[in-house]
Image (cartoon, rainbow, N blue to C red):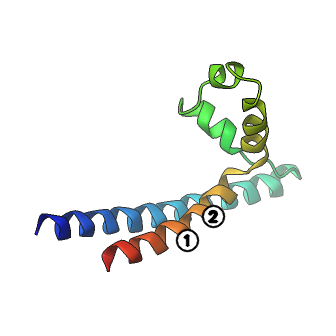
Amino acid sequence: MLDTVMDRLLANLLFALSLAAICGAVMLLLGGFVEYLQSDAWRSISVLQFGYDTHLIRAQWFLAHDWSWGIHDVLEAIPLYAALLGFAPVSWWLSGRVAR
């Protein structure tokens, strides 16, 4: 019984994360479009900058090892809205798999 309750809770959590990711990506794209209309420049926040701003990523992690600069460059190149749009279908699919 507890397993089914935990599975249902996890499925609902993954579904809610999927919907939040889609809404966040749409809001970021809408904000970028409005900024583009005002200033003729499309600026988007990267995953790395979002991690720094929310204190999820620390700069010292990349200073500890030489190989970590490759990860730093990849995170800097990925726009946040693209990461959210990539995460949303995966989370939605996982919620369906867990619900079964």
Q: Nearer the viewer, residue 31 or 46?
A: 46
Element marked by disc 1: helix
Residue in the picture at 53% in, 60% down: 21
Residue that mark 2 sits on = 86
In the rendered structure, the answer to whether residue 25 lies left or right of residue 19 reads right
Residue 10, quarter of picture: bottom left
Asked if marks 1 and 2 touch (Cβ < 8 Å), the reply is: yes
Element marked by disc 2: helix
Residue in the picture at 75% in, 30% down: 67
Q: Amino acid at mark 2?
A: Gly
Q: Nearer the viewer, residue 43 or 20?
A: 20
Q: Amino acid at mark 1?
A: Pro
Image quadrant holding the N terminus, namely bottom left
In the rendered structure, the answer to whether residue 89 lies left or right of residue 36 reads left
- In percent of width and height, residue 60 lies at 64, 19
Residue that mark 1 sits on = 89
Q: Residue furthest left?
A: 1
Residue 36, quarter of picture: bottom right
- In percent of width and height, residue 11 lies at 33, 68
